[in-house]
Image (cartoon, rainbow, N blue to C red):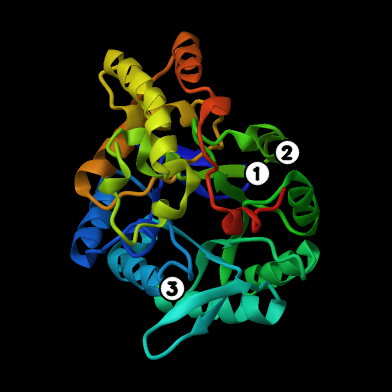
Amino acid sequence: MKTRRLGNSDLSVSAVGLGCMGMSFAYGGSDDARSVRTLHRAVELGVTLFDTAEVYGPFINEELVGRALKPMRDKVVIATKFGFRIRAEGEGVARMAGVDSRPSHIREAVEGSLRRLGVETIDLLYQHRLDPAVPIEEVVGEMATLVAEGKVRALGLSEVGSSTIRRAHAVHPIAAVQSEYSLWSREPEADVLPVCRELGIGFVPYSPLGRGALTGAIRTRDALASDDFRRRVPRFDEANLAANLAQVDALERIAATKNASAAQLALAWLLHQGDAIVPIPGARQLAHVEANAAAADIVLTATDLKAIEAATPADAVAGARYGAGELALIDR
């Protein structure tokens, strides 16, 4: 697979990465053996960027990723995130309990991630969500100290606004900003993407397939497990989902003309938005990671891009991308 550099950093990664959250968290039951096979197949296909976080589980996704990728550690870039307070609620049970980016907590979180991943250095460390109680300068200052100590290689931020990016980058170079971005979530185009391009910062879209909706595989809420996070997302309310499927159907028709799937077309569209953009679609099955990797080879013309955008107008998407609680955590 072709590689891309994340902005002006020294991180060179595959054009399409792999978001690992769904292997352990948010989308229903998990199967570690299947996930390990998927991770190994991704490496075989040339995927080198793997994204996890301490809160995915919590903790168990980092353990899974670290264990699976240990034999090929020198071939991969592992990204993880801190930024939430995680509270124990009995033996083997833990829950998120608000944001926490105090310097002491950052250090504690990083030590835990290093241990669970089984690595000496985290390749890319993100602040998962902004903590209003801690100035971003203080947060990045502590992150920079971890770089100087050799515990972290490069720094990132997740779901932050353009002003925060500028303030953070003034303290220490930011390698990547991660935010939801897809044909269904175009918000970064207004301010965040222009700032990233100006400052030489890579951009890593998560949920680039609209949390699976743009694949065309989810035609009704009944397709979602009872404990699937998407049941709380307004965009997946029955009425909203039904309305949004018209766009998915249109995307599938265009994809057929390119001998591709709707999911591959959505990823290819993202890759054509800039050379420093590296989407991280989630995948739990071999077939999905193979299809996602193949999307990196799809070439779209200017006419193709216009047709895709006309078929999926951002202002026509029904429902918010998060519930009110999650939206309150996003910096704007």
Q: What residue did someone put label 1 on? A: 201
Tell me where residue 93 appears, x and y as whole percent: 40, 83
Residue 319 placement, left or right of 149 = left
Evaluate whether residue 87 shows in this view.
yes
Of badges 1 and 3, nearer the viewer stands 3
Q: Which quarter of the rendered picture does the N terminus lie within? A: top left
Quadrant assignment, res 287:
top left
**Which residue is drawn at the image coordinates 58% and 33% (left, top)?**
186
Residue 259: quadrant of the picture: top left
Camera-side residue of 139 and 212: 212
Q: Which mark is residue 195?
A: 2
| Residue 118 seen from this side | no
Query: What's the distance in space between the residues labelled 1 and 3, CA to CA?
Result: 28 Å
Residue 195, above or below 156: above
Whole-number angstrom distance, CA of label 2 to CA of label 3: 32 Å
Depth check, mark 2 against mark 3: the one in front is: 3
Kindly state the secondary structure of the residue where label 3 is placed.
Answer: loop
Give the residue drawn at x 71%, y 54%. Answer: 173
